Amino acid sequence: MLKKTDIVVFDFDGTLSARDSNVEFAKYCFRHSIRPWLYLPLMAVCGVIRWIKPHGLWWRENIRRFITRDMVKKFAPDFIKLHKRERFGWAKERVAAERAAGRTVVLISASTDYLVPQLVRDMKFDAVLCSRMDKKKPWRYEYICW
């Protein structure tokens, strides 16, 4: 017989945090690097294609093409410190209360593995599922990886 387990699942962006971490990281990169500005024409094309084919992945991947592994290494640590302040005040306490009640607490997010695990490390989730950054092409994600 299977053991019954109570599981509580949280989303991060817009649920535990006031803002979308991917969007905010892109804005942070624009404020701290010239590289994103050089990709604005490509982003404009992606914006048009989004209206034509909103469900495709091409525009989603290419709108983030300015992100490099070096940018992630350079900007993610300071961004994470700043973005942690955007979490709702009740978030950490709510996760702790669910754990104290004996429930398994899981976070699921479409945001990336170079942001989400570090943004919630202090919240002590039992598992964090998020999108994984492609190591060779950091603008590409493998969606919802364990």
Image (cartoon, rainbow, N blue to C red):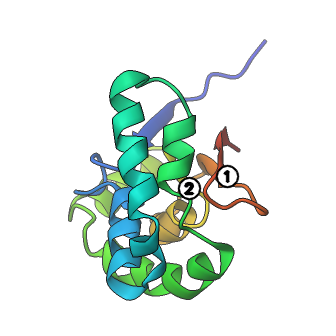
* Kind of residue indicated by mark 1: Arg
Q: Which residue is mark 1?
A: 132
Q: Is residue 66 visible?
A: yes
Residue at image location 53% in from the left, 69% down from the top: 121
Q: Residues within 10 Å of mark 2 (few under 14, many from 20)?
A: many
Residue at the limit of the structure toward the top, as seen here? 1
Q: Nearer the viewer, residue 107 or 51?
A: 51
Give residue 142's position: percent from left, percent from top: 69, 43
Disc 1 + disc 2, Cβ < 8 Å? yes
Q: For mark 2, give the secondary structure.
A: strand
Give whichever of discs 1 and 2 has the lower sequence position. Answer: 2
Looking at the rendered image, the quarter that the N terminus falls into is top right
Camera-nearest residue between 37 and 137: 37
Is disc 1 surrounded by few (<14), some (14 to 19) or many (20+) residues within 10 Å? some
In the rendering, at what x and y percent does residue 52 appear?
38, 23
Q: In the figure, is residue 128 to the left or right of 132? A: left
Residue at the spot x=45%, y=36% of the render?
Answer: 8
Q: Which label sits on residue 112?
A: 2
Which is nearer the eye, 110 or 117? 110
Query: How many numbered marks does the figure carry?
Result: 2
Give the quadrant of the C terminus: top right
Alpha-carbon distance for marks 1 and 2? Answer: 6 Å
In this view of the protein, can residue 103 be seen by the observer?
no
Report the residue at 77% width, 63% height from top.
135
Say which quarter of the image contains residue 53.
top left
**Amino acid type, residue under disc 2 in the picture:** Thr
- Please state the horizontal and vertical placement of residue 12, each as a whole percent of the image: 39, 50
Kindly state the secondary structure of the residue where label 1 is placed.
strand
Picture layout, residue 70 above or below residue 122: below
- Reply above or below: 146 against 33: above
- Residue 15 shown left or right of residue 7 in the figure: left
